[in-house]
Amino acid sequence: MPVRSLNSSVLVWPDRDRVIREARRWARVVASEPGGVQRIGYFGSYARGDCGVGSDLDLVAIVERSDEPFVQRSARWPTETLPVPADLIVYTTGEWERLATTQSRFARALRRETI
């Protein structure tokens, strides 16, 4: 999260390199836990390189399977440990494969941007 500078009341937003480094560390930890995580990536402004102060980190995870409804899956993931707010979308392998065949604007952006 943004932190106060030591000698001022100005908030300092973490730079892109730090956010990506911390996101990769977070992904390694999450993927090492039981749960069938197959892949984790980021997309959006951090992937494109046009992030700035206030940008959130857009994450996508692919799990082998899930019994949870799509809209509830990301709730159990500890994104609060990341240095900026994060939006996480969790797909099963089958959902991800189906998404890859669609031509929706969102699916095209995911294919183009996800790292």
Image: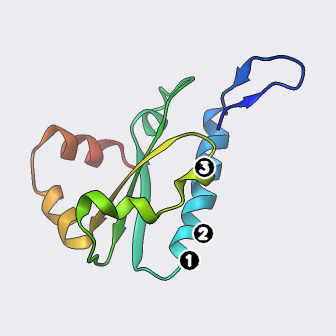
Front residue of 28/73: it is 73
Mark 2, other Cα within 10 Å: few <14 / some 14–19 / many ≥20 = few
Outermost residue toward the bottom in this view: 34
Q: Is residue 9 above or below residue 78?
A: above
Q: Position of residue 95 (x, y in %)?
A: 19, 65
Question: Secondary structure under badge 3?
Answer: loop
CB contact under 8 Å: marks 2 and 1: yes
Where is mark 3, residue-wise? Answer: 82
Q: Position of residue 43 (x, y in %)?
A: 39, 43
Mark 3, other Cα within 10 Å: few <14 / some 14–19 / many ≥20 = some
Residue 109 seen in render: yes
Where is mark 1, residue-wise? Answer: 32
Residue 115 seen in render: no
Mark 1, other Cα within 10 Å: few <14 / some 14–19 / many ≥20 = few
Q: Position of residue 22 (x, y in %)?
A: 64, 51
Tell me the quadrant of the picture where the N terminus can be found.
top right
Where is mark 2, residue-wise? Answer: 29
Could you give the CA–CA distance between mark 3 and mark 2, rounded to whole angstroms? Answer: 12 Å
